[in-house]
Image (cartoon, coloured by chain):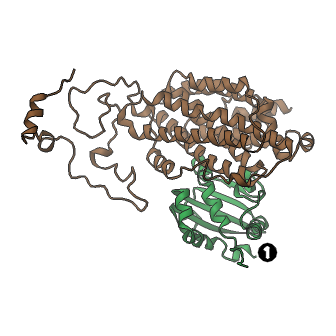
Chain colours: A brown, B green
Amino acid sequence: MIGADLDYYRRAQRGELDLGWLRDSRSEWGVKATPSRVGLTLRDISIGSYGEVPDRAPLRTMAPRGSDVDPDVPDMGYTINDKAEVWSDNLLSLYEEAVSRQWSATRDIPWSELPELDPDLEHAMCQLCTVLSEVEMVAADFPAKWLWRINHDFIEAKMFLCTQVMDEARHTEVFRKRALANGGGLGKSKAVVEQFLKLVLDAESYDEGSALMHLLGEGVVLSLFRAGEFLSPSPVEKKIFRLCMQDEARHVAYGTMHLRYRLERDPSIAEDFHGYLDKGEGIIAMLFTTPEVVEPTTILAAGGLAQAEDLAMTAANVVRGNVIHEYLERCEHAGLPRWDRVTLPAEMLADVPGLQGRAAERVQEVMA
Amino acid sequence: MNDFADDGWFARLPAVADKDPETFERLGFAELRLLFEVIDGDDIRRFGLVLDGYDVDYAGEIADVDAFAADTIVTGPIDAWSEMAANIAAHGGADKEHTLNCLTMAGVPLSVTAPDPMGRDKFFRYAETLQALFDGTAPEPAVA
């Protein structure tokens, strides 16, 4: 237990300064960061010993990396002490981009220009907003749950995850606001959606949760945001979806490059990640067969309920095809190719462009 | 309308950012090398757009595609590009059928490809900046 040093207090009162910190510091002196054209970025200050991130954190403290640390600092009990567990090569630039590209759901959306919609379209938009408002907050809860367990030496990863928490709060906010802004209100919340959220939140490791959330879940939502912009009945919703799309793409960029960093350093854990995604894909398949998730986009794409019955699932199939294609490409880029492993039913893969390997064979078998 | 590829439309993009720095600073940093391919029969013309920080560093025709090293490539027939430009000009910005995301969502009339998924995802990461740039090519409304 540290007690107050009253002797020092009395000496200092008399002007007898200690100055040990001034004369005898073991941190690096003479390191001068130069701002880049947009200001002083994390990359600009990643210099000298301050830019060296240890593969294994030597201590479990909140001491700033590169500082001269007291030998008797308390143990903070961090459980994530290996850099590879949270790092990605694009972290520094993603953090700066996230801070720079923040926006306000109150100020930046032209709410006063929201037009009155046909009731079926309004209902469809509100149901889509209900699902999105529901799923977005897990992408804040999950990093928040793990943030305090991540060693302070990986502060850039923690800072990026903090931006994600803020992004997701804003997404939850903007979709809740849209649902309430035009007389529709919130729609149905389905158990299957909650099952996926629970899978992410209950993940036993950061590895598992990050694969499920950053790579799979947010990849799906990114495609849904693209579809939302495409289907939006007015410029107001279009702007909402474009702004959300930007944020979500940053999270997916972190997730993909984090997994790549992780697997490059320990390829032996690839099978663990396949297992996590096997489970996640099972629930994603259930989402693709949930009317509350699928049908709003169908109605919005068709421009109305009657037209949707004529068009059937054409638009939903295009969206699903893009979702799965982009997800499988990201898996491959991360070093975890799943063309032979993807567990989604073959019928759901039929509209996926550029299908390869066993997945393509499964589709051919079903079609035959 | 079909003189789109020759009329310097892409070359006007730096001026759009220069004219309204407040909007582009509020939208935030971007770091992107985007290649536009305009297909006219057997002819393909290529235009590059380089975003760096808050600025448009370059926008214009590209002779050496490999040296340009695009993150993302948006490809489509000249008629689609021309229609988009005309729509932006007519409405003071793209209407709901002519935003970049709308035109590329289904792969037609424009398609997005990239050397890797990270490059393609950059097209989404800067979606609002790109749309604001494109919308900024619309002529300013005449003052009565």
Q: Is residue A363 left or right of residue A252?
A: right
- Residue A246, compared with residue A203, is above or below; it is below
Q: Is residue B48 left or right of residue A10?
A: right
Chain at numbered mark 1: B
- Which residue is painted at 31% across and 29% down in the image? A61
Q: Nearer the viewer, residue A105 or B130?
A: A105
Image x and y of residue B125, in percent = 59, 51
Q: Nearer the viewer, residue A12 or A125?
A: A12
Q: Give the residue type that dot 1 points to.
A: Met
Q: Quadrant of residue A218?
A: top right
- Which residue is painted at 53% across and 40% down in the image? A166
Q: Is residue A350 left or right of residue A276?
A: right
Image x and y of residue B138, in percent = 69, 70
The answer to whether residue A361 is seen in the rendering is yes
- Residue A299, compared with residue A137, is above or below; it is below
Image x and y of residue A337, in percent = 61, 35
Q: Quadrant of residue A281?
A: top right
Q: Nearer the viewer, residue A4 or A56?
A: A4
- Residue A29, compared with residue A193, is above or below; it is below
Image x and y of residue A341, in percent = 66, 29
Q: Secondary structure at mark 1?
A: loop
| Quarter of the picture holding the C terminus of chain A | top right
Q: Quickly name the residue at label 1.
A: B1
- Which residue is painted at 46% across and 44% down in the image? A91
Q: Nearer the viewer, residue A75 or A183?
A: A183
